[in-house]
Image: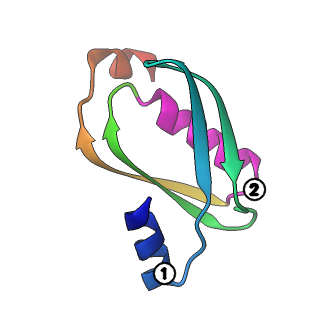
Amino acid sequence: MQEQKLLAKCSNCDVAICQKNREQSDIVNSMHLIGDVKGKTAILMDDIISTGGTMCAAAKLLMTNGATEVYACISHGTICRRLFKKY
């Protein structure tokens, strides 16, 4: 979270958080937005992506809460075959 706050400060932007709650290590059972994205461009940042499920759920949550655009930045893609079949 420190990197996101630093980037936001340098870019004169706000920070919002998509907080996920996990039932198990690989199952997200809920996600909540902390912050305001209405009328704003959102940039999702994460360290690892495998199936893309959490990233897609976060993008939908942001759009549902009024974001005009959503972009994603991921530092490590450990893409699994299920991702290509799923989307």
Residue range in magenta is 52-67
For mark 2, give the secondary structure: loop
Please name the residue that numbered disc 2 is placed on. Answer: 66
**Amino acid found under the numbered disc labelled 1:** Lys
Task: Give left or right: position of 30 versus 2.
Answer: right
Task: Give the spatial CA distance, label 2 vs label 1.
Answer: 22 Å
Q: Is residue 56 magenta?
A: yes
Q: Quadrant of residue 26?
A: top left
Count of number-bearing discs: 2
Q: How is the image coloured?
A: rainbow
Query: Of callouts 2 and 1, which one flags the residue occurring earlier in the amino acid sequence?
Result: 1
Q: Quadrant of residue 21?
A: top right
Tell which of 7 and 73 is nearer to you: 7
- Classify 7 as above or below 37: below
For mark 1, give the secondary structure: helix
* Residue at 60% across, 58% down: 69
* Residue at 53% across, 84% down: 12
Tell which of 84 and 30 is nearer to you: 30
**Amino acid found under the numbered disc labelled 2:** Gly
Task: Give left or right: position of 17 versus 83.
Answer: right
- Classify 66 as above or below 15: above
- Classify 64 as above or below 43: above
* Residue at 35% across, 15% down: 82
- Classify 53 as above or below 59: above
Q: Nearer the viewer, mark 2 or mark 1?
A: 1
Position of the N terminus, as image quadrant, is bottom left
Residue 65 rendering spot, x and y as whole percentages: 76, 51
The image's mark for residue 44 is: none
Residue 59 rendering spot, x and y as whole percentages: 58, 44
Please name the residue that numbered disc 1 is placed on. Answer: 9
Q: Is residue 11 magenta?
A: no
* Residue at 60% across, 46% down: 18
